[in-house]
Amino acid sequence: MSGAGSNLAALLDAAQRDDYPAEVVLVVSNRPTATALRIAADRGVACECLPVAEYGGDRHVRDLALRDRLRAAGVPLVVCAGYDRILDDAVLAAFPDAILNVHPSLLPAFAGGMHAVEEALQSGVKVSGCTVQFLEPGAPDGGTVILQAAVPVLDDDDAESLRRRIHEQEWRLLPEAVALWCQGRLRRAGRRVLVSPPAEQVATLRTGAR
Ligand code: GRF
């Protein structure tokens, strides 16, 4: 992550529930000033900062270090929760179908930038929202969509009010997508990601039990 860390906080809240199938073992930021780092530290989660300046300003070299750090931590899943840089293909290749990203628009609308909320307002759309997607090589924000939530654009919205309501949906959607991934309930069908029912529901359907 790179910034305020409200999505990280939502994930950490979710992970405190006994029935949540994931834990956050490492938080990495590219920015020393990211509030996300303090949120992680306050909650006792290991956190590290890998600013590009420490790698001679070379993003590729920094991203190789990031990949190696994530591998060393043994994480099966990486979550970009407000990461403001495009990850090097070397990172994407190291975690196929295992890097989730959250973006504040209904992708593919308003992809590829840091101003999706402002662009939605300027474009005059009546509905925007947020997307959790797999990060894949190719166009920025072009990965396969996992979950989306729509948020109406109100006549008196400004960027701050719309961002706030989109954020509220992100805080729900991102922990849900992480849980689905951890439960093995995401299945690709071409460009679509299909969500399987929970295991107990499958068992019920099979036995016909009520
Ligand atoms: C979120 O709106 C996310 O969609 C975008 O960056 C923002 C991060 O917010 N990629 P926060 O740092 O989690 O509060």
Image (cartoon, rainbow, N blue to C red):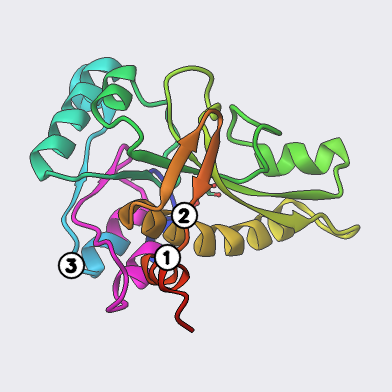
Q: Amino acid at mark 1?
A: Val
Give the secondary structure at mark 3: loop
Give the secondary structure at mark 2: loop
Name the residue: 59% across, 64% down: 168
Read off the residue under disc 1: 202
What separation in Å lies between label 2 and label 3 (alpha carbons)?
33 Å
User: Label for residue 183?
Assistant: none
* Residues in magenta, as a range: 11-38
Q: Amino acid at mark 3?
A: Gly
Is the residue indicated by label 2 positioned so its CB lies within 8 Å of ligand 1? no
Read off the residue under disc 3: 44
Name the residue: 49% across, 84% down: 210
Q: Amino acid at mark 2?
A: Ser
Quadrant of image for the N terminus? top left
Q: Is residue 67 left or right of residue 4?
A: left
Query: Marks 3 and 2: in contact by CB < 8 Å?
Result: no
Q: Is residue 36 magenta?
A: yes
What separation in Å lies between label 3 and label 1 (alpha carbons)?
37 Å
Read off the residue under disc 2: 196
User: From this viewpoint, is residue 58 visible?
Assistant: no
